[in-house]
Image: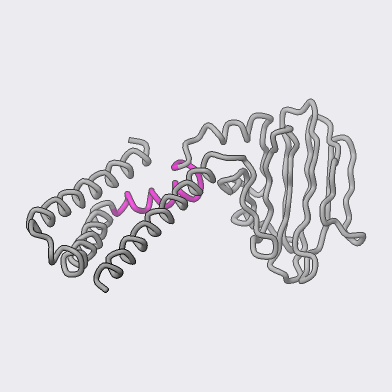
Amino acid sequence: MKENTKKFSRLKLAGGAVLVFLCAVFLMGSLSSCSKPLIVPGASIGFFIWKDSGSNIHIAWSGDRRNKTFSGILKTDGVFNILEKAGIEEQDKINQSPKEISFDATLNAEDYSDELVISAGGYSYIDFNLKIDGTYDLARIHLGKYLNNPPSEEFRIDINYFENLKKIPWYNNHPFAEFFHKLYANKYTTFIYIYILGIIIIELLRITKFGPVKRRGLLLGVSYLVLFLIDAGFFIILWYANGH
């Protein structure tokens, strides 16, 4: 009976390790893979803009299954050509000229995501003027895979904008930059919280796992040393991520 319990515990431990490894692989893949943002139609709300491997510009908008109006005007010093209109309904208005594209589309419970794929040639800039329900909402306009928000209501991107975004380290992109900045602004409190959390975990291990171990004192000492090193390493990462 005890042997079966030990085998079950080992299987649980191995399964947990595999799960953590797979999550880490997925996270690193999402941080270093394609430039398309993660969009969940019907749940993600707002505009999503990115450039694909063929240098085409994608502008998608998604709602929360409620009636919402998405409108916008794109202007360029080059030449526009709409390659694809995904999810566009007959009542949606799309106007195109060589240097300007405008649209006015409504999403609802049945139609909750649209997308335009645009070829832009010979341009140095593209100007965007985007509204949701007739108003500006910069928090709902997302640029690139890290969902960066534009700096102003009417904004411009140049021909190298998305390429330059890829050169920015992931921890300096949205939302990681804001998160790390807040943690570093309260760095001593963050350090203490992590240490207290580590103490709780170690003490739980002491009660449940370290009891029958012969060198329990040594194991506890090593655990607290590792906790200190992890806490200090996290502090260094925050320090580095905040431009030091």
Please provide percent x and percent y for residue 234: 29, 47
Q: Residue furthest top?
A: 122
The question of residue 131 being in magenta is answered with: no
Please provide percent x and percent y for residue 13: 33, 60
Q: Is residue 199 left or right of residue 52?
A: left
Q: Residue furthest right?
A: 90
Q: Nearer the viewer, residue 2 or 203?
A: 2
Q: Is residue 101 above or below residue 223?
A: above
Q: Is residue 64 left or right of residue 116?
A: left
- The image's colour scheme reads one colour
Q: Nearer the viewer, residue 220 or 209?
A: 209
Q: Is residue 144 left or right of residue 27?
A: right
Based on the displayed image, in which of its 4 quarters is residue 211 positioned?
Answer: bottom left
| Quadrant where the C terminus is found in the figure | top left
Q: Is residue 36 above or below residue 65?
A: above
Q: Residue at x 67, y 32 (%)?
A: 158
Please provide percent x and percent y for residue 23: 46, 52
Q: Residue at x 72, y 55 (%)?
A: 61
Prevailing secondary structure class for the magenta stretch in the rendered image = helix
Q: Residue furthest bottom?
A: 1
| Quadrant where the N terminus is found in the figure | bottom left
Please provide percent x and percent y for residue 168: 50, 35
Q: Nearer the viewer, residue 155 or 106?
A: 106
Based on the displayed image, in which of its 4 quarters is residue 3 positioned?
Answer: bottom left
The question of residue 183 being in magenta is answered with: yes
Q: Which residues are magenta?
A: 171-186
- The mark total stands at 0
Q: Residue at x 69, y 65 (%)?
A: 42
